[in-house]
Image (tube, helix red, strand yellow):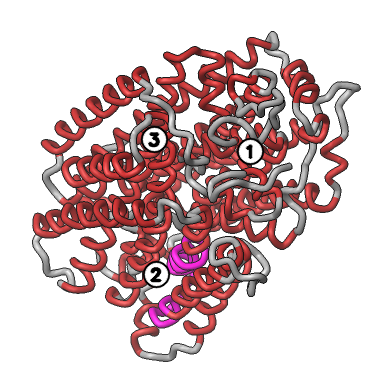
Amino acid sequence: MGAKTFSHIQQEPLFRELVDKRTRFAWQLSASMLVIYFGFIAIIAFAPQILATPIGGGVTTVGIPVGLFVIVSAFALTGLYVHRANSKFDPLTRQIIEKVK
Amino acid sequence: MRAPKGFFAGFGLILIAGGFCDAFAAGAVEGGTRQGLNVTAIIMFFVFVAATLGITKWAAKRTKSAADFYAAGGGITGFQNGLAIAGDYMSAASFLGISGLVFATGFDGLIYSVGWLVGWPIILFLIAERLRNLGKYTFADVAAFRLEQTPIRTLAATGTLIVVAFYLIAQMVGAGKLIELLFGLPYLYAVILVGALMIVYVAFGGMVATTWVQIIKAGLLLGGATFMALMVLATFGFSTEAMFRAAVDIHPKHAAIMAPGGLVSDPISAISLGLALMFGTAGLPHILMRFFTVADAKAARKSVFYATGFIGYFYILTFIIGFGAITLLMNDPTYFKVAVNGTYNKVTDILGGTNMAAIHLANAVGGSLFLGFISAVAFATILAVVAGLTLAGASAVSHDLYASVIAKGKVAEDKEVRLSKLAALAIGIVAIMLGYIFENQNVAFMVGLAFAVAASCNFPVLLMSVFWKGISSRGALLGGFLGLISAVVMVVLSPAVWVKTFGFKAALFPYDNPALFSMTIAFVGIWLFSKLDASARARFERDAFEAQYVRSETGIGAAEALAH
């Protein structure tokens, strides 16, 4: 495939749409993961007593569900991305490939 | 609390003291308490070895081309690859180390395990699909896509081999100690056995055999850990509150195990460790290589989804296992070194050290048969990880250094594969020798160093070459090497190495994990030296970005690359 084809694809509005949407979504999700994880670390570093608070008179502390949330959120975020990629980004990619064939 | 005894002792205690790196140790186990021959464990282990050797034989028949050898012909499905990634990533350090850390400190073990998981989403969002679209066999294919082959491949191969070497030494020493303890096999024999098996898997079965060893191991480990966690929860009528209550009553630290302890004492260390774990994962050559084993970007994406699920689930299990060990072991003196007056420390006196908590728990919940099973699983775990590392190292030697740098791409495929097999043999022999030499050395910092180098050299070069049009070969080379050198130097001067290993009084660099600083150096270095590069070559590389960009985003042109 020649350089001409590539520059042709790059100017293709569908390509711009795909790249813009996917890049924005990917960075948003990355930022969410960073905020969740480093937020968790920041609470531990600066206000650990929040996580040490027992829930409803038991011995289970707030820290347990919060830690679990960080783990589950990592999985959920990847799921969100895969869902969006399968339903939106892949059809767009196929359209682009069809168009430049 | 007693001072840690021996180099491998007090895994959790050292960690609490602020030495983050120490906790990276692969299966850090207190030496010297070798058990008698464990017959069940040995039988189960032989079943595993026989099965994996059978698979290797089958894989060897299917491994004909270079694509088969390096990338299993791209024929692994997303789900299989997700399991294999999990098998490649969940080391003995994760299983025994983190459950041991939970056993010793409670909640802090959870904080630590979370760090190992959060890099995966980032790999998915930024790297996985683009890697698959651009590369063929190694991540250097991607980094050197439009840059000068010789310097960038040399840099990537250096980064790969350093990561592989340190990771392997830590695994070999951990394996030797663990096997000595579990199977009653002398240290040297254990190291030779591990080395020999990994050579056979990689040299004869290539990526196909390596992948299936990792898949089987992941299945066994997840199955075994699930059983243990269920047995623990069943003891408490599936009430975690009841389990936590019993743990708080029994553990010498009582309610403190339900809250953050001293793991994160200073924010800079915590952030630096977090960065190393997150972005180091995204720069591990044996992990990145796994993305070339699937057919396309869609399968690469699925692999990370499944891998994240398996790994996250596994860390939840290790947390329950750690608490199970607290509740079911601490009041039972048969698992402890009991003093003449009948007393023992409920944390540090556990037989074999705190990292043996999960192993003892296996006995407590499933008897000697299940103990044998979990011991065999721990061994299988190490084998799967070292096989992946060996293959990554061998590929760097044959595909990057030999085929691209020395032969300038003019090399027959079968010759390249043959060289790769020889490289696997050489790496295996060197790993056995290093494992022997480092038997009584402190290798705990080595996995930390591997992650720091991966985060500070491999990852920045890879990310910038994929996303930044302005990168030039000179910028990538200088920035990458600055990141690599600064990471190594800062680790050597850190408390974990300078003080604890070399015995100097004060560390010259205050933090055990340099990633915050060395990553910054790498990124700024790549940016600065690329900006300053006004050569014709650099202009050509910037112009070539367009074609790379279209291919990395859409996969157009990627399928052709695999076919030849």
In the rendered view, does B374 fall on the left or right side of B329? Answer: left
Q: Which residue lies under the disc numbered 1?
A: B101
Badge 2: chain ID: B
Taking B98 as reference, is B183 above or below it?
above
Classified by dominant secondary structure, the portion drawn in magenta counts as helix
User: Residue B273 sits in which quadrant?
Assistant: bottom right
Circle 2 sits in a helix, a strand or a loop, which is it?
Answer: helix
For badge 2, the amino acid type reads Glu
- Residue B455 is a magenta residue: yes
Q: Nearer the viewer, mark 2 or mark 3?
A: 3
The residues bearing labels 2 and 3 have C-alpha atoms spaced at a distance of: 52 Å
Q: Earlier in the sequence, mark 2 or mark 3?
A: 3
Residue span colored magenta? B454-477
Q: Nearer the viewer, residue B446 or A1?
A: B446
Taking B106 as reference, is B280 above or below it?
below
In which quadrant will I find the N terminus of chain A?
A: bottom left
Badge 1: chain ID: B
